[in-house]
Image: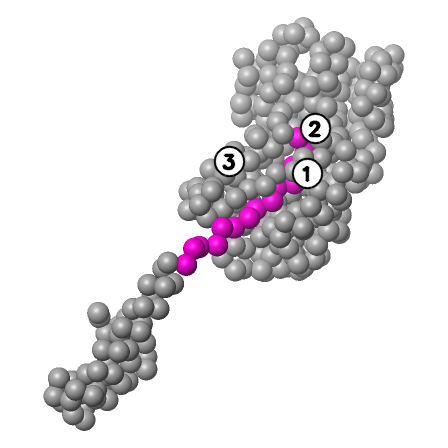
Amino acid sequence: MKKRNLPQWLHSLSDNRKSKSGPADENPKWAGLVALAVVIMLCGALAEAQQPKKVARICYLGNTVTTSEANMKPFRERLREIGYIEGQNVTIDYRYWEGKVERLPVLAAEFVGLNCDVILTSGSEGPQAAKNATKTIPIVMAFGADAVRMGIVADLARPGGNITGLTSISVEILGKRLELLKETVPKLARVAYLWSRTNPDADDQFKEVAAVARFLRVEVQSLAVKGPDDFSGVFETALKRRAQALLFGTGGFFGAHHQRIVDLAAKSRLPGIYPNLQFVDAGGLMYYGEDRAEMFRRAAEVVDKILKGTKPADIPVERPKKFDFVINLKAAKQIGFTVPPEVLARASRIIR
């Protein structure tokens, strides 16, 4: 064994013996002490190596199974790259609230009962529910509403408390989506804006939409969707008011009913820009927003820091850096709509 691997007290003992008495084999007493110390140290190291390593428990509070599968794929991939293997040194528990906000407190409480090492959340509603459920278990946001404005964290650079991760910019994004919709439908004069009362960011989002609409000289038809039974009536109202396009607020409620929304939009032959990539993959026309895959990869890195001992309060909350603009030309053909070539040229991905 190399001397640098010995404890400091053993270094001192060995050095002291050599300086006073010469080689250790000239004094059996000292040689025995050194040998005994080495044996004790080796036994301790062997016992430590035989102890089972702690399996970290990550608990994911997601909206639907479909969206969670898409979001968690890059998260799990990044965890593997870092060195976490599911079933060996990490497990992931899942709970889904399926667009029903009343289920969130119960699901968050379940995670507290499971003694999770980290709770991972997505969307605007999840972080608040997790925060209300625990002040001690670390919470990592993969994305959601503006965390500072919603009062989830005190400050992006110094979040404080037990919550950190990544925050979305859903309010600002809505203005950009309306601008893109105007470019895609050049003669756009009336847009139906569908929003959900369950979204905690609804008021600020509508203010942003209204401000951008005034600048673009577009009339906004505000259509609140109270529940799943309202969708058909809301689309009928949009057609009666001669809406020319669709814009959607954010929130897990819409995400849970994305296929129904896309089908009604196709039936109504209305072009729309949607709040989540899953809408476009399901047949919607356009999506502009944060690169969710990249955000979940970054969330995995934040979880890693916490599992290694860093406190959430010491990890700055990040804003998105990459954005996607996806256009579905199959959807455009289905409703008989032509996307201008200059808009197509700006797309990061085109579904043909």
**Left or right of residue 346, residue 270 in this image:** right
> Residue at 73% across / 19% down in the picture?
261
Q: Is residue 60 magenta?
A: yes
User: Which three-letter amino acid code belongs to the residue tagged 2?
Assistant: Gly
| Mark 3 or 2, nearer chain start | 3
Residue in view at x 65 percent, y 7 percent: 334
Chain part drawn in magenta: 51-64
Q: Position of residue 2 (x, y in %)?
A: 22, 70
Image colouring: one colour
Q: Residue at x 75, y 51 (%)?
A: 132
Side of 328 relative to 258 (left or right): left
Residue sitting nearer the eye, 249 or 210? 249
Please name whichever residue, 343 or 262, is drawn nearer the observer in this view of the structure: 262
Return the disc, 3 or 1, that comes first in the chain's sequence: 3
Q: Residues within 10 Å of mark 2 (few under 14, many from 20)?
A: many
The kind of residue on which mark 1 rests is: Gly
Q: Which element carries disc 3, helix, strand or loop?
A: helix
Quadrant of the image for the N terminus? bottom left
Q: What secondary structure is marked by label 2?
A: helix
Precedes in sequence: disc 2 or disc 1: 1
Name the residue tied to disc 3.
74
Q: Which residue is mark 2?
A: 255
Q: Which amino acid does the dot numbered 3 rest on?
A: Pro
- The residue carrying pointer 3 sits among few (fewer than 14), some (14 to 19) or many (20 or more) residues within 10 Å by Cα, namely many
Horizontal side of residue 38 vs 314, given as left or right? left
Q: Is residue 327 visible?
A: yes
Q: Nearer the viewer, residue 183 or 39?
A: 39
Measured Cα–Cα span from mark 3 to mark 2: 19 Å
Q: Measured along the vertical axis of the image, is residue 323 above or below residue 162?
A: above
Could you say where residue 187 lies in the image, as x and y percent from the top left? Answer: 75, 15
Which residue position holds label 1?
Answer: 123
